[in-house]
Amino acid sequence: DMDQRMLGVMLRSAFSTGSPDRSELMLYILSQAESAGVPDHWRVPASAFALVLRCLLKGEDDVVAHYAAKTIENVVALAGAHARPFCTAETVKALWAVVLASKAQPLRRTAAAAIARVLLADRVLVQVLIDVAGMAALRALLQDTNIAVRHTAVEMYIMALLAAKNLA
């Protein structure tokens, strides 16, 4: 509908111009909703979460994808009910695709950190990462040239090892 298209245009515009104001507004609203509650007209619609996720798709501008990954990382860090829309297999798969495909180091670092946040929020999704990435790819990420990606890879690899141990 028109509201969803308008929200999509606003998010992409804010992300692509390097002005994450809408993302920060979304984060602020969600953090306030968790602690104090907000009126219904301030609620973040489910479509906003889907639009942020779409900003990670292949072919998207790196700046747009970076702000989308950072939004996911920050919202999931809030925990609570508002993290759930991003705690999905689709999110893990989209972020992993960014880690693999992007040449932009800040984007790769942020996407990896967002994956780790999602996995910490919902341990069931560790198996999704194992299925999508494979243990060999996670192990290879431990040798990444970006130290921040390597650090996050250690967290993901440990979670994967613990999940595999629990399945055995």
Image (tube, rainbow, N blue to C red):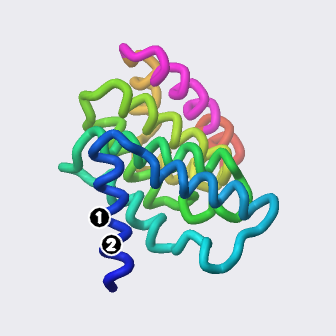
Q: Is residue 157 magenta?
A: yes
User: Does 27 sit above or below residue 96?
Assistant: below
What is the number of the mark on residue 135?
none
Q: Is residue 150 magenta?
A: yes
Residue 162 in which image quadrant: top right
Residue visible at 48% across and 51% down in the picture = 23
Q: Quadrant of the N terminus?
A: bottom left
**Which range is magenta?**
145-159
Looking at the image, residue 61 sits to the left or right of residue 14; the answer is left
Q: How many marks?
A: 2
Residue visible at 22% across and 44% down in the picture = 61
Percent coordinates x, y for residue 154 in the rendering: 57, 24
Percent coordinates x, y for residue 33 in the rendering: 72, 64
Are discs 1 and 2 less than 8 Å apart at CB? yes
Looking at the image, which is closer to me, 78 or 130?
78
Task: Give the amino acid type for the residue marked by disc 2 in the picture.
Answer: Met
Residue 18 in which image quadrant: top left
Residue 152 in which image quadrant: top right
Residue situated furthest bottom in the rendering: 1
Please, what is the dominant secondary structure of the magenta stretch?
helix
What is the number of the mark on residue 9?
1
Residue where numbered disc 2 is placed: 6
Q: CA distance from mark 1 to mark 2?
A: 5 Å
